[in-house]
Amino acid sequence: MTVKDKGHNMPTRGTHATHAQARSQAMRTASAREGVTASVDYTKTPVSEIFGQNVFNRNVMRALLPKNVYKALVRCLDHGEPLEPSMADIVANAMKDWAISRGATHFTHWFQPMTGFTAEKHDSFISSGDDGGAILEFSGKLLIQGEPDASSFPSGGIRSTFEARGYTGWDPTSPAFLMESVNGKTLCIPTVFCSYSGHALDKKTPLLRSVEAVGKQALKLVRLLGNKESKRIHCTVGAEQEYFLIDEAFYLARPDLINCGRALFGAKPPKGQEMEDHYWGSIKERVLAFMMDAEAELYKLGVPVKTRHNEVAPAQFEVAPIFESSNVACDHNMLLMEVFRKTAQKHGLRCLFHEKPFSGVNGSGKHNNWSMADEHGNNLLDPGVTPEQNMQFLVVLTAIIRAIHKYGAALRASIAFAGNDHRLGANEAPPAIMSIYLGDKLTEVVHTLVHGKKEGGSAGGKKLQLGVSHLPELPRDESDRNRTSPFAFTGNKFEFRAVGSSQSIAWPNTVLNTIVADSLEYLHNEIEKETQELKDVTKAADKVVRRVLAEHEAILFNGDNYSKEWHAEAARRGLPNLATTVEALPELVTDQVQELFVKYKVLQNDELTSRYTVQLENYCKTVNIESLLTANIAKVMILPAAMEYQLKLAQTITTTKQALGQVMMTEQESLLRQVSQKIGDLYNAVDKLEALIKEGHQEEHGDHGAGDLLDRARFYEQQIITAMTTVRTLADELETVVDDALWPLPKFREMLYIY
Ligand code: ADP
Ligand code: MG
């Protein structure tokens, strides 16, 4: 079955369909559409057969590569050993043959510039043969390195224009895959992206460096504690992804959704999420058809999506994968978003990843589940069952607590951008204040360690001692667990919940890994020092953990993070509340944070500054686009509709008076006056917004220093956003009084409910 009525919702030029007519047409289109058949029929092809079929994974490599090459590649993947160029040629050739046998014609280095999206430039495998025919080629050199023009990607000032060339380099730790499209397949090779001078121009390079840093420090620490098993430690990540789905017909009738990904206007719907009937509710037929189709595409790409459900807000949903190594998890999340966007369109739907597409109902985030594990899959945040395992767990936990307390502001800054400001610090959980939730049991453990209460509470009870006593059983999944915390321990991992739904998870994970690396090393050094003194590593660990926890327990909070009381309490504890992007971003480039990134070789100073600059620029640009569109939609769509209603009211009054003589029409006249007043107010508000936008542009063409950029961002935050809010408030008020038949924009009560 195909999408019915696709594209018929828009008024065609030349006919005189109004926006309001388009809106009612959109409702009919949306409700008439049916589920679309997926590309895979599971009754004929089981999931096990399609999973990873488009991936050049280890199984494929083992089958296609000579034994010595395969082994060399595995050493490269598992132990970071470099791959000889001659080997790369063999891998490239096998990859090409495999891709071509599956229908690929082109290849691309697939990378993640600082735009936060993925980038690709396709090259075909053909090179011309002597006889006028074409031969298909792909060498190790082409596999390993590409030279895209970097001049049109954001560099935050580190790449001067004269060295326009950028370099992409193969990342063998994330498997190559085939991207299917209607007319063929493209071999996508995950790569890093750097400048000629080796500066990272992407999100992947720092992530890889940070994983290496944290892995190295973690290994050093667990070795000191007596762990002889682990040889390599990496990070594991599972990103739960929230999103909205609305019918495409509504989307196309909303310029704000098309251009900004969020509704810049729209009164709160009479029915929001208060009935609590959407969360985990039965999934609507068309939506489920979409989910299954998108999942099938992801299975082919080896993305292990696992759960699907309705989220809190109407039209909001969630998908979660099985966790993977953080680099692959990050690539897979980028792929997931892309596949969801594409598949939604196939189903006559649009997938919105914006953090707050519809004000008045819940926003969307990405819960970044994070932990560390060794090469055997032993999870460092698994409390374990033996006293030794418990000790390792508590030492690692202590390091994380210290990291978040010490560098929470930098972590907060890693998720700071215009879209996320609508959630964090904007009366929605989680808040902008970083704190850690441990749950009651584990908090009790920490409390006991710091304040020395006896285990079990009774006098004479055994003292809780690291490496000697058992931890009480920690609940894996507390049903009452706190959903308002930005950073929560959930049994055997931490869940960083303040990440925005649209953003790449690479950067927040990079910052998280780096700050944890620092604390792991700190604990290692302290325990090592104490061991010399106490001649016993267990006693040393016990002593250090107690001291460090005491210094950093202020970051722990199990209560309602959303409450006013917490805001006051957090201030008392000296925890920063960086409510907006502009307040948060400078925290990325403090001396302390810069030193940290340099020390762990994750980012040099100019590389870190460039991320700060790109984030600030992105903020200004986003708000600028939103403000231009706000002014425009108000002027060319909302005001004309409101004035038509004004005219209708005036005509009604005049005509009635003509017909009946001088009757009293107090109520109607009052309504007219009210409408006319609001129209005037809206005009003035738009005028003011436009004047400020102009001012913003003048500032832009002034000086270009980083300090000025921060000033400009502040101007956008304080002046432009305020003026936009005024325009919106007035327009939304008009929405509730103007004749529904004249209203040009699909309303929330329609978009969020009609499928
Ligand atoms: P919940 O949010 O209810 O706790 P799950 O326990 O299923 O749901 O986990 C949510 C996400 O956390 C999933 O993507 C899961 O794969 C991931 N996850 C589980 N264990 C780990 C781990 N050790 N490291 C990273 N992510 C993990
Ligand atoms: Mg979760």
Image (tube, grey):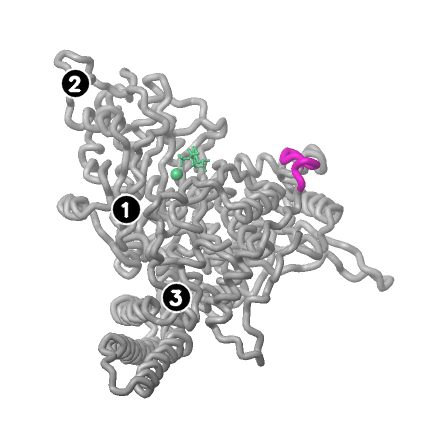
Mark 2 crowdedness (10 Å alpha carbons): few <14, some 14-19, many ≥20: few
**Image position of 73 with respect to 358: above or below:** above
The residue most toward the right is 131
Identify the residue under disc 1. 408
Q: Which of the marked residues, 3 or 1, is nearer the chain's N terminus?
A: 1
As measured in the structure, the alpha-carbon distance from the residue carrying label 2 to the one carrying label 1 is 32 Å
- The residue positioned 26% from the left and 21% from the top of the image is 466
Q: Secondary structure at mark 1?
A: helix
Looking at the image, in which quadrant does ligand 2 appear?
top left
Amino acid at pointer 3: Thr
Mark 3 crowdedness (10 Å alpha carbons): few <14, some 14-19, many ≥20: some
Highlighted range, magenta: 41-49
As measured in the structure, the alpha-carbon distance from the residue carrying label 3 to the one carrying label 2 is 55 Å
The reply, left or right, for residue 687 in relation to residue 116 is left
Nearer the camera: disc 2 or disc 1: 2
Residue 137 percent coordinates (x, y):
74, 54
Dot label at residue 457: 2
Amino acid at pointer 1: Gly
**Image position of 394 with respect to 111: above or below:** above
The reply, left or right, for residue 6 in relation to residue 520 is right
The reply, left or right, for residue 260 in relation to residue 531 is right
Identify the residue under disc 3. 622
Please count the marks in the image: 3
As measured in the structure, the alpha-carbon distance from the residue carrying label 3 to the one carrying label 1 is 25 Å
Q: Secondary structure at mark 2?
A: loop
Residue 57 percent coordinates (x, y):
63, 39
Q: Out of 439 and 379, give the one closest to the viewer.
A: 439
